Image (spheres, coloured by chain):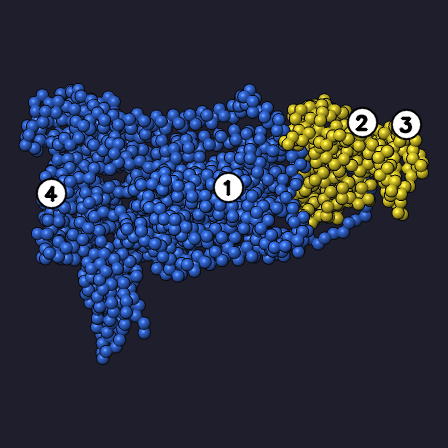
């Protein structure tokens, strides 16, 4: 007989069985949907550097990225089901002895089973590839993200990334399945791999990560995505490269892939050996697993007793519901705690919790200062996913346990209600989930304690956030999920089908989540439900969170009722089942279930109605659509007169979220023509009482655009006052989905501003409101000539503001300008803020604050968030002092910074009244290498100049004047206050941030984009400073601000460059540099070669070649260096100290794209390395690699 | 009293496992005899509330247990034909868990009761051993112990003596007989001797139908004078098999000892003498009669 006949037959049977199993149809469906979604662009796969939206999805790079992620996220778990459970199933079916009484050898059996399972997945993968090709090149062929069809673009990624993954994720679970014979453990490997991949291996890449560790992570990442991402996708190679170039893996990576494939095959060989050993040992467990068992000496049979059964006087009283449940729960728990999987999974989950809490990093690689609330929120989603997966496996195994052990007939004939039976099992698993949460709680306490002891964290432990977030959000999810699995099990009656369905549900939930947080009604998993704020976590979404949790909890009895009804305790009769499907029977059954559905229907309706009638209701957004439709054609582009003064009187009631507004805008016609009518945009606030020039007035209401027809036209130089009065609720009711809010009136705080008509009218027509277009049309190249609209704030000249705010006494309310009065009466505080210099926008922020006074500055913060206040205050003082010296005198008397609840993210630099979300600066962990608290304040404070004194224009090149210039100011302030060490550290971090975040193929020049260019803009200005000289560029910037400070024409960077050019000592060099960094996209990348070090007399001579393998032409220094540059001794974190032993000698090279130059550096010391750009003056792609260690 | 009326069970296929069986089972031991696939286990699983019938009713003490299987679980002791236990538990723990689920109570408490029950089935020596280390016979005895637990009004035992050695089999018979004094015990087996020894009443099921509802002595009595036994050469076997209904054929010292049924008034072949009818003769004849011309059945 052919030696392959028997294994072939085993494989063939396995394959034929596999292709009929529902799990694989579900997988095929999921993959088909993803292929379709990717093809039509509705699904994207995120990477570290942006999204998968490379021009060609069909390029080898596009397909590699998709296949990497697809295989690790879907393939790993399904391959575990396919291969890991196959032998366990045969064991359950007790066919093994029959098999092995034939000539089938164990090796033939094991390899046949493995290959059969892998063949099923291979078929699914093949179908997926065919589907992708069809969708991409037939259905969506010709679209801009679909390139020409090259078969190798699909097959090569499968060979390089797919085959090793398939063999690994099929082989190892296969071994685990045979070795342990426990389905739960089979999932251990893919779970570990998934966790590691999605937390550390694929995209975790803080700026301080060393290249060696990065390379090691690339090689141990089974998905291969990290290698692809770090080697190609975040590196600038130009769009043509990604679309047309083949993908060449390096030797190390190829060897890593071969090793993964080999590991899978070795695992199968190991499985064969283990299987044979166990078969010979008569099915005894492996020794390791036996360690979990207690041994007892066997006892011999005693004498034959002859006693009667009647003597025992037994009676029976069936147990009540709760007692029966408790008995089953006890049995389940005893089973769980004596089984090894518990001891694998729980530490794994804890490891995940701890690593996330300790490895997580924020902006610029900063560590976030962990508080109980942030830890509880941060870990919530992770715990959610992990425990849901675990509950899936445990619940299914628990429900199937009796059948597996052939005990189901005895168990099912016991006088215990099915409900009690299911509840008992569910509670057993809930105990496990509870144990995991408890362990995570202890771990979190450990992490916080660790930070207290070793990182000087001043944060204490508080149980409430954990109880609220984990207890209030996670536990209901776990209970619901267990009920869902139980229903699925009762309905499908096949554990493998339940696994597939469960995994599919979780994968789909993940997909939905990736497309945006689901609505309150649909968010069953509770993902991102709570956005924690120490200032009042539930003040924004308390009601919908409560309703959402109650809604899903109330579904549990319904699900339990269904499960009890369908649970296979008594095998259904097919005929009777058909009878039950008769409409009448179905109607009756539905009627019987109706009582269970009443509460969920009621709560769901409340949630649905609440969300639809809340502040994001269609009516609210509907007015925006009407506003745009009715007014765009008539009013877009209408120039407005300036507002010269704003007067607001605000009565705020935080508990009611309400505000009563009375105010007036004084318009001043700064133009040379008269106005017959003035439009104002107001929100849907009813009723609004309007006044015109002191008289009551009824303007034309054009869906929110109120048009005031003037009796006397507003002549040039004339003024007119429009008054208004109304009440509104800011964030009325609930939102449609979880998430933050930019402006609100809540008990935890008040955040309002005049950008949009959220609480105060906005002069003129706002084309952004209700616009169906996401992107503005491309403006003409010279759009900035003449008067340009402001990027933010109101058009026209700056204006003065008086804000009178009345609130409950415990609140501190800040507005723009200086405080002119603060009075308390009858528990109400009234403050009046007046600007002592015109502004371009205004805001109001209030909260229960502590205040920290600086030198003409003040920080208002949540009483618990005092950790970084001193450093932030120093930054605010320094910013006020030095920016005033460098750019323009600070025209206002005070500079305030106030903390706002984390519902509103980021920070905003309103004139004199900066707002910071609590996560920024206030909760940044101190880092001995960087002043990150200082950095965020320095940036936001710079907006007083770059954003307020100088109001950037709307259009390409505008925003960089706000954000890029603020970051550039931050570089200067670092240098001024802390010296070169910290300036260099900051510059390196923002360079790394820029490099990592680039979407190289889509990046546009600064003058072509409305982006903020925080990092690149700062670097471009920094390099311009090197070219012009510090004093020259500062003089130029001062002139620029003076020119536009009170100008109704708002400048863009194209307006700034000519002003600076006038101060440039070498205009040709200035033009060349500006052309590259502002009008083009370049990125130098330097590499050393042939570097030698020799001793010549008293000198050391370093020779070598530097090549610019990137783009752009820059003059750059090459330094021969000895010793560490910076010393910690004497540096008390306040000023850079150069280390005693540090020496360097330098040469300069100028290199264009692809050019190389030799260099010679002579030094009177022995250098140990050469460094390109030691002072960090020129931006470059791969700075970490631009260092060469000199031997000897 | 267990009353089964017009019970039909059709499995997908379709396979008619029960074709309208009706019977009344009084208190005491009741034997259910039938060949493999006759429908015995199907019937028992329906009575135990583990399988829904296609039609028909089952009443126990007047309660409709098809409509509400919970009613029977309260008073049921059940030993399935094929069963297992949680392998990680000891015999004692396993039994105690089942005693708790059944709501069994006893004067000395459940621990004591479990020990006593294990003693009754001669498993005391293995009480602290994990069930997964039990032999087939030990597992069967543990199953018997759990079935006897409580004070079940209805005891259903399906092939209970499979895997038991003769000594244990006798012990079980004794326990069963003791319990059957004041309750209904439904014993399913294809070992005719078990029925003969234990059951005052019995039924024979074949191809999903009851072909007899009788007592062992009545079944035997009906065959009086119709059973003959003789020794024949191999060559004559085919002829005898063609002309008579053979109830037994055993090769003894190179010749065949054959028992045949000769209808009343008929003449036995040469060399055959009248023999005392056995229950096995009755069972085989009844089962054969019904099985002819009907190939339907199911695994039991």
Disc 3/disc 1 C-alpha distance (Å) = 66 Å
Callouts 2 and 4 on one subunit: no
**Secondary structure found at label 3:** loop
**Foreground mark, 3 or 4?**
3
Circle 1 is placed at which residue position?
A: A24
Identify the residue at horizontal 49%, vertical 37% (top origin).
A481
**Disc 1 or 4, which lies upstream in sequence?**
1
Identify the residue at horizontal 32%, vertical 27% (top origin).
A617
Callouts 1 and 2 on one subunit: no
Mark 3 belongs to chain = B
Residues packed near mark 1 inside 10 Å, few (<14), some (14 to 19) or many (20 plus): many
Q: Position of residue A1121 (x, y in %)?
A: 26, 68
Q: In the rendered view, would you say B76 is above or below A197?
A: above
Callouts 3 and 1 on one subunit: no
**Secondary structure found at label 2:** strand
Disc 3/disc 4 C-alpha distance (Å) = 129 Å
Would residue A637 be seen by someone viewing this image from the given angle?
Answer: yes
Circle 3 is placed at which residue position?
A: B264
Disc 1/disc 2 C-alpha distance (Å) = 52 Å
Mark 1 belongs to chain = A
**Foreground mark, 2 or 4?**
2
């Amino acid at each position: 007989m052919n030696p392959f006949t028997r294994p072939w037959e085993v494989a063939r049977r396995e394959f034929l069985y596999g292709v009929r199993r529902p799990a694989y149809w579900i997988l095929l469906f999921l993959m088909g949907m993803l292929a379709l979604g990717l093809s039509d662009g509705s699904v994207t796969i995120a990477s570290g550097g942006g999204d998968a939206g490379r021009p060609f999805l069909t390029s080898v790079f596009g397909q590699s990225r998709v296949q990497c992620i697809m295989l690790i996220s879907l393939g790993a778990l399904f391959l575990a089901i396919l291969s890991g459970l196959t032998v366990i199933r045969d064991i359950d079916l007790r066919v093994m002895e029959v098999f092995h009484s034939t000539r089938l050898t164990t090796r033939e059996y094991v390899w046949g089973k493995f290959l059969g399972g892998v063949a099923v997945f291979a078929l699914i993968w093949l179908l997926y590839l065919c589907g992708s090709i069809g969708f991409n090149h037939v259905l969506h062929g010709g679209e801009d993200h679909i390139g020409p069809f090259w078969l190798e673009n699909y097959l090569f990624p499968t060979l390089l990334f797919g085959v090793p993954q398939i063999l690994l994720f099929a082989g190892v679970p296969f071994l685990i399945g045979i070795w342990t014979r426990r389905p739960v453990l089979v999932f251990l490997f893919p779970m570990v791999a998934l966790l590691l991949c999605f937390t550390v291996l694929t995209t975790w890449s803080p700026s301080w990560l060393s290249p060696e560790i990065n390379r090691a992570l690339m090689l141990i990442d089974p998905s291969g995505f990290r290698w692809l991402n770090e080697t190609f996708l975040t590196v600038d190679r130009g769009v043509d490269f990604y679309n047309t170039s083949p993908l060449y893996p390096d030797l190390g990576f190829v060897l890593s892939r071969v090793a993964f494939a080999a590991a899978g095959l070795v695992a199968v060989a190991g499985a064969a050996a283990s299987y044979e050993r166990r078969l010979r040992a008569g099915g005894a467990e492996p020794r390791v697993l036996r360690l979990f068992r207690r041994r007892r000496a066997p006892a011999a049979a005693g004498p034959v007793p002859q006693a009667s059964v009647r003597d025992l006087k037994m009676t029976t009283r069936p147990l009540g519901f709760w007692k029966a449940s408790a008995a089953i729960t006890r049995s389940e728990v005893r089973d769980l705690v004596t089984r090894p999987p518990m001891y694998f999974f729980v530490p794994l989950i804890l490891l995940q919790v701890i690593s996330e809490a300790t490895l997580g990093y924020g902006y610029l690689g900063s560590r976030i200062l962990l508080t109980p609330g942030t830890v509880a929120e941060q870990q919530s989603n992770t715990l959610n996913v992990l425990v849901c997966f675990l509950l899936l496996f445990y619940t299914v195994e628990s429900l199937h346990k009796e059948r597996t052990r052939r005990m189901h007939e005895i168990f099912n004939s016991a006088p215990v209600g099915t409900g009690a039976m299911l509840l008992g099992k569910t509670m057993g698993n809930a105990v496990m989930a509870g144990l995991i949460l408890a362990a995570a709680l202890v771990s979190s306490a450990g992490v916080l304690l660790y930070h207290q002891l070793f990182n000087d964290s001043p944060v204490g432990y508080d149980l409430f956030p954990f109880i609220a977030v984990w207890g209030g959000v996670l536990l209901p999810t776990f209970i619901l999920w267990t009920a869902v699995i139980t229903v699925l099990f009762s309905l499908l009656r096949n554990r493998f089908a339940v696994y597939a369905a469960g995994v599919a549900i979780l994968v789909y939930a993940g997909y939905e989540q990736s497309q945006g947080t689901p609505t309150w009604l649909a968010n069953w998993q509770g993902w991102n439900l709570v956005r924690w704020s120490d200032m009042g976590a539930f003040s924004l979404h308390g009601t919908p969170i409560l309703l959402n949790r109650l809604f899903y909890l109330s579904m549990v009895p319904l699900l339990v009722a269904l499960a009890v009804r369908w649970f296979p305790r008594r095998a259904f009769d097919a005929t009777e089942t058909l009878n039950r499907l008769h409409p009448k029977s179905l109607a009756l059954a539905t009627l019987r279930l109706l009582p269970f559905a009443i509460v969920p229907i009621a709560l769901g309706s409340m949630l649905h109605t609440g969300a639809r009638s809340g502040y994001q209701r269609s009516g609210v957004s509907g007015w925006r659509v009407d506003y745009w439709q009715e007014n765009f054609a008539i009013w877009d582009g209408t120039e407005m007169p300036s507002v010269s003064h704003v007067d607001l009187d605000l009565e705020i009631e935080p508990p009611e979220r309400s505000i009563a507004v009375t105010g007036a805008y004084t318009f001043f016609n700064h133009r040379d023509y008269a106005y017959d009518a003035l439009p104002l945009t107001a929100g849907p606030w009813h009723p609004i009482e309007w006044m015109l020039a002191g008289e009551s007035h009824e303007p034309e209401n054009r869906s929110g655009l109120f048009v005031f027809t003037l009796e006397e036209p507003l002549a040039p130089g004339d003024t007119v006052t429009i008054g208004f009065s109304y009440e509104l609720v800011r964030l009325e009711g609930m939102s449609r989905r979880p998430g933050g809010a930019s402006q609100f009136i809540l008990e935890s705080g008040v955040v309002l501003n005049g950008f949009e008509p959220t609480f105060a009218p906005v002069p003129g027509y706002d084309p952004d409101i209700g616009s169906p277009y996401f992107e503005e049309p491309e403006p003409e190249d010279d759009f900035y000539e003449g008067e340009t609209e402001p990027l933010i704030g109101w058009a026209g000249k700056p204006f003065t503001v008086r804000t009178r705010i009345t609130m409950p006494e415990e609140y501190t309310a800040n507005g723009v300008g200086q405080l002119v009065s603060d009075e308390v009466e009858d528990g109400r505080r009234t403050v009046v803020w007046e600007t002592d210099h015109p502004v371009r926008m205004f805001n109001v922020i209030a909260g229960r604050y502590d205040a920290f006074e600086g030198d003409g500055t003040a920080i208002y913060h949540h009483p618990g968030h005092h950790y970084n206040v001193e450093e932030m205050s120093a930054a605010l003082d320094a910013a006020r002092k030095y920016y005033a010296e460098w750019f323009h005198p600070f025209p206002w008397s005070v500079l305030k910074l106030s903390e706002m609840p984390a519902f509103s993210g980021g920070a905003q630099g309103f004139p004199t009244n900066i707002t910071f979300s609590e996560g920024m600066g206030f909760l940044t962990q101190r880092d001995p290498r960087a002043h990150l608290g200082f950095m965020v304040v320095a940036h936001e404070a710079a907006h007083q100049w770059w954003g307020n004194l100088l109001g950037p224009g709307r259009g390409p090149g505008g925003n960089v004047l706000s954000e890029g210039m603020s970051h550039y100011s931050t570089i200067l302030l670092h240098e001024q206050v802390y010296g070169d060490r910290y300036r260099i550290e900051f510059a390196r971090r923002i360079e790394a941030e820029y490099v990592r975040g680039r979407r190289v193929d889509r990046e546009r020049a600064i003058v072509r984009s409305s982006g903020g260019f925080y990092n690149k803009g700062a670097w471009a200005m920094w390099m311009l400073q090197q070219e012009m000289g510090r004093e020259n560029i500062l003089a130029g910037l001062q002139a620029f601000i003076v020119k536009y400070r009170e100008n109704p024409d708002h400048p863009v960077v194209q307006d700034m460059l000519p002003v600076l050019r006038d101060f440039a000592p070498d205009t040709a060099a200035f033009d060349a540099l500006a052309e590259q960094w502002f009008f083009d996209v370049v990125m130098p990348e330097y590499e050393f070669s042939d570097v030698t070090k020799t001793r010549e007399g008293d000198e050391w001579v370093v020779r070598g070649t530097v090549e610019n393998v990137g783009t752009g032409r820059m003059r750059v220094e090459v330094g021969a260096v000895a010793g560490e540059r910076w010393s910690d001794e004497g540096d008390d974190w306040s000023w850079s100290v150069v280390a005693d032993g540090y020496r360097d000698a330098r040469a300069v090279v100028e290199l264009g794209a692809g050019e190389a130059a030799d260099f010679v550096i002579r030094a009177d010391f022995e250098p140990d390395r050469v460094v390109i750009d030691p002072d960090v003056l020129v931006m470059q792609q791969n700075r970490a690699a631009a260092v060469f260690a000199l031997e000897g | 009293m267990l009353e089964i009326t017009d019970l039909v069970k059709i499995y997908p296929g379709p396979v008619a496992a029960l074709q309208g069986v009706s019977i009344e089972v009084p208190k005491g031991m009741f034997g259910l005899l039938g060949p493999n696939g006759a429908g015995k286990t199907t019937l028992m699983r329906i009575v135990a509330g583990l399988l829904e019938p296609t039609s028909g009713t089952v009443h126990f003490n007047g309660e409709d247990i098809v409509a509400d299987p919970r009613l029977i679980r309260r008073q049921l002791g059940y030993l399935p034909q094929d069963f297992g236990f949680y392998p990680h538990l000891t015999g004692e723990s396993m039994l105690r868990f089942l005693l708790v689920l059944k709501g069994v109570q006893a004067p000395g408490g459940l621990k004591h009761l479990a020990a006593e029950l294990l003693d009754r089935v001669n498993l005391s020596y293995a009480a602290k051993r994990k069930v997964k280390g039990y032999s087939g016979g030990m597992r069967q005895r543990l199953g018997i112990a759990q079935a006897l637990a409580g004070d079940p009004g209805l005891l259903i035992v399906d092939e209970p003596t499979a895997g038991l050695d003769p000594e244990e089999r006798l012990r079980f018979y004794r326990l069963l007989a003791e319990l059957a004094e004041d309750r209904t015990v439904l014993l399913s087996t294809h070992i005719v001797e078990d029925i003969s020894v234990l059951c005052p009443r019995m039924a024979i099921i074949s191809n999903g139908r009851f072909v007899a509802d009788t007592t062992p002595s009545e079944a035997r009595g009906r065959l009086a004078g119709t059973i003959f036994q003789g020794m024949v050469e191999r060559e004559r076997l085919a002829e005898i098999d063609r002309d008579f209904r053979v109830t037994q054929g055993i090769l003894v010292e190179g010749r065949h000892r054959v028992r045949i049924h000769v209808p009343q008034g008929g003449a036995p072949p040469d060399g055959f003498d009248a023999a005392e009818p056995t229950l096995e003769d009755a069972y085989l004849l009844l089962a054969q009669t019904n099985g002819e011309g009907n190939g339907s059945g199911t695994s039991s």
